[in-house]
């Protein structure tokens, strides 16, 4: 559905995007994960036609995206990173203005406003001024505004920043519901937990370049070391731990031993059999699977968290 082909974009001397290519299929929940300044918002702005790429193209359903192509732009809903709402106006009044931007009016607009307010669970607050809303409520209203024209694809630029955990979960539920109803979702974040939880496929972006893409499992499989065993240090484990040295690389911190198995495809049953033979009670053992953080660290040598 969305095809981004070899896009470059610079701002003066700053190269914000370099040779970015991505294909996103209809119905996907696609994540764009990257640290601050990676180029996520710039790419979003190019997808919606707000910025022109220096070179490269963006097409939706094989048709080229440009700022002038309003029909194309209507296929997309955009939830901007910076909340764009009129604080002095009510939720209802805000949505009227956004609806009119998409040539919606009258009864059909009112019906749509009711529908989206219902979806984002703000119906009972529709007459209240936005300046009285919490951060999470503003985020939800921002999302509602992007849905009035019933776009096929929704671009969400870090829609949970500054939102408490409960509102964050509510936003996840809403996006999952929209995705299940058939909408394609492109979701940017710098929280790897969000990308892991929500996205069926994702790309990692760093310094304006896509450095890896695929499903979570495909990305984890890029790593040699997919699992780590942590074994608590205590009277039950400390004299027995050396026996596990033959399974891989053993190291220790103040509270834990850490085992990186030599063969990362080693079966858990075999590892636990060795642990039992060594006489280590398995309640002191924890297996942790590699995360997107490890993938990022492995490729860039830096942590995703600043
Ligand atoms: N309008 C602009 N003019 C000049 N430089 C810009 C502009 N927009 C973005 N940049 C620069 O381009 C780079 C990428 O910025 P962008 O906002 O796309 O990153 P991001 O991944 O969205 O970051 P964040 O997670 O902080 O939102 C940054 O170095 C930024 O300073
Ligand atoms: Mg951004």
Image (cartoon, helix red, strand yellow):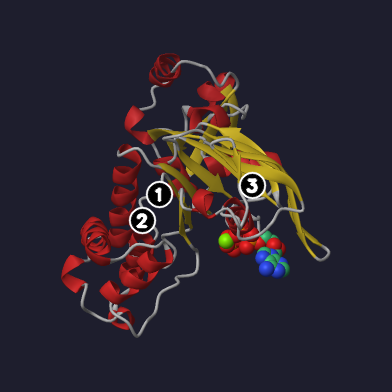
Q: Quadrant of residue 218?
A: top right
Residue placed most toward the observer, 259 or 179: 179
Q: Residue at x 38, y 42 (%)?
A: 183
Q: Disc 3 vs disc 2: which is toward the camera?
A: 2
Report crowding for label 3: few under 14, some 14 to 19, many 20 or more residues within 10 A (C-alpha).
many
Disc 1 target residue? 151
Q: Residue at x 60, y 21 (%)?
A: 262
Disc 2 target residue? 147
Task: Report the image quarter containing ligand 2.
Answer: bottom right
**Residue 188 visible (yes or no):** no
The residue tagged with tag 1: helix, strand or loop?
Answer: loop
Total marks placed: 3
Report crowding for label 2: few under 14, some 14 to 19, many 20 or more residues within 10 A (C-alpha).
many
Instruction: Give x and y (percent) for residue 142.
Output: 38, 65
**Residue 40 visible (yes or no):** yes
Q: Residue at x 37, y 60 (%)?
A: 143
Which comes before the other along the chain, label 3 or label 2? Answer: 2
Quick check: marks 2 and 1 in contact, CB under 8 Å?
A: yes
Q: Residue at x 35, y 37 (%)?
A: 182
Q: Is residue 65 left or right of residue 301?
A: left
Residue placed most toward the observer, 144 or 169: 144
Disc 3 target residue? 205
- The residue most toward the right is 13
The residue tagged with tag 3: helix, strand or loop?
Answer: strand
15 vs 90: above or below: above
Label annotation for residue 53: none
Label 3 CB-ligand 1 distance < 8 A: yes
Quick check: marks 3 and 2 in contact, CB under 8 Å?
A: no
Q: Quadrant of residue 252?
A: top right
- In the picture, which quadrant includes the C terminus? bottom right
């Amino acid at each position: 559905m969305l095809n981004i082909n070899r896009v470059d974009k610079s701002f003066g001397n700053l190269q914000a995007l370099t040779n970015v290519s991505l294909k996103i299929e209809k119905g996907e929940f696609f994540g764009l994960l990257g640290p601050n300044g990676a180029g996520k918002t710039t790419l979003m702005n190019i997808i919606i036609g707000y910025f022109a790429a220096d070179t490269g193209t963006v097409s939706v359903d094989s048709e080229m995206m440009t700022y002038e192509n309003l029909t194309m732009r209507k296929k997309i809903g955009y939830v901007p990173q910076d909340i764009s709402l009129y604080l002095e106006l009510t939720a209802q009044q805000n949505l009227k203005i956004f609806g009119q931007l998409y040539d919606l009016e009258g009864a059909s607009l009112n019906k749509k406003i009711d529908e989206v307010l219902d979806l984002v669970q703000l119906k009972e607050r529709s007459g209240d001024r936005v300046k009285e809303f919490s951060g999470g409520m503003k985020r939800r209203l921002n999302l509602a505004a992007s849905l009035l024209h019933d776009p096929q694809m929704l671009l969400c630029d870090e829609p949970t920043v500054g939102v408490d955990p409960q509102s964050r979960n509510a936003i996840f539920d809403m996006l999952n519901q929209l995705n299940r109803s058939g909408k394609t979702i492109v979701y940017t974040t710098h929280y790897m937990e969000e990308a892991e939880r929500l996205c069926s496929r994702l790309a990692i972006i760093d310094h304006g370049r896509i450095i890896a893409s695929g499903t979570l499992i495909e990305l984890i499989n890029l790593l040699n070391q997919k699992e780590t065993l942590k074994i608590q240090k205590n009277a039950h484990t400390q004299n027995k731990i050396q026996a596990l040295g033959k399974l891989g690389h053993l190291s220790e911190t103040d509270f834990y031993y850490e085992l990186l198995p030599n063969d990362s495809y080693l079966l858990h049953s075999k590892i636990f059999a060795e642990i039992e033979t060594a006489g280590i009670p398995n309640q002191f053992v924890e297996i942790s699977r590699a995360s997107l953080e490890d993938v990022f660290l492995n490729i860039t040598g830096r942590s995703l968290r600043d």
